[in-house]
Image (cartoon, rainbow, N blue to C red):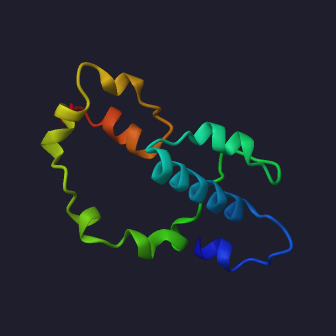
């Protein structure tokens, strides 16, 4: 949102489009208790899209990530086994950082 807010208003940017999508999804959830991200991103199209719509560099997000919850997560390491049961780790997409960590850290599962 910070990035979208700071940009010129003449052109819809990737960041602005992402904010519109988030607001729409939150509105849907607040109104109906459900949201459909795929439908939202397919129906609201302002410019060419790509799979990096919500991507932003670490230097821009670092101040949001400095929190006690991230330094000491609420979910303990031992709870991962209870969350990912019966081979659930096989359904993760390992190109994603969290999925890759869960899938490749043998003592977690």
Residue 47, x across and y down, in percent? 83, 53
| Res. 55 visible in picture | no
Q: Residue at x 51, y 66 (%)?
A: 58
| Residue lying furthest front | 31
Q: Identify the image quadrant of the C terminus.
A: top left
Name the residue rendered at 49%, 50% in the picture. 31
Task: Give the side of residue 48 with respect to residue 95, left or right.
Answer: right
Most extreme residue toward the top is 86
The image quadrant that residue 3 belongs to is bottom right
Q: Is residue 61 rendered to the left or right of residue 54?
A: left
Q: Is residue 104 above or below residue 85?
A: below
Residue found at x 59% / y 76%: 2
Q: In this rendering, is residue 72 above or below 108? A: below
Q: Nearer the viewer, residue 6 or 70?
A: 6
* Residue nearer the viewer, 54 or 62: 54
The residue sitting at 29% across, 63% down in the picture is 70
Report how many numbered discs are placed on residues in the image: 0
Looking at the image, the residue that sits furthest to the right is: 10
Q: Quadrant of the N terminus?
A: bottom right
Quadrant hosting residue 69: bottom left
Residue 30 in the image, given as x and y percentages of width and height: 46, 53
Looking at the image, residue 23 lies above or below residue 83: below
Report if residue 32 is visible in the image: yes
Residue 105 x/y as whole percent: 28, 37
Q: Is residue 9 above or below residue 41?
A: below
């Amino acid at each position: 949102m910070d990035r979208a807010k700071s940009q010129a208003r003449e052109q819809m940017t990737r960041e602005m489009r992402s904010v519109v999508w988030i607001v729409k999804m939150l509105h849907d959830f607040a109104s109906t208790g459900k949201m459909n991200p795929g439908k939202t991103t397919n129906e609201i199209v302002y410019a060419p899209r790509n799979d990096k719509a919500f991507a932003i560099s670490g230097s821009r997000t670092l101040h949001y990530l400095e929190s006690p919850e991230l330094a000491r997560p609420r979910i303990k390491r031992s709870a991962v086994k209870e969350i990912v049961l019966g081979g659930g780790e096989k359904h993760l997409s390992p190109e994603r950082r969290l999925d890759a960590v869960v899938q490749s850290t043998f003592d977690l599962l």
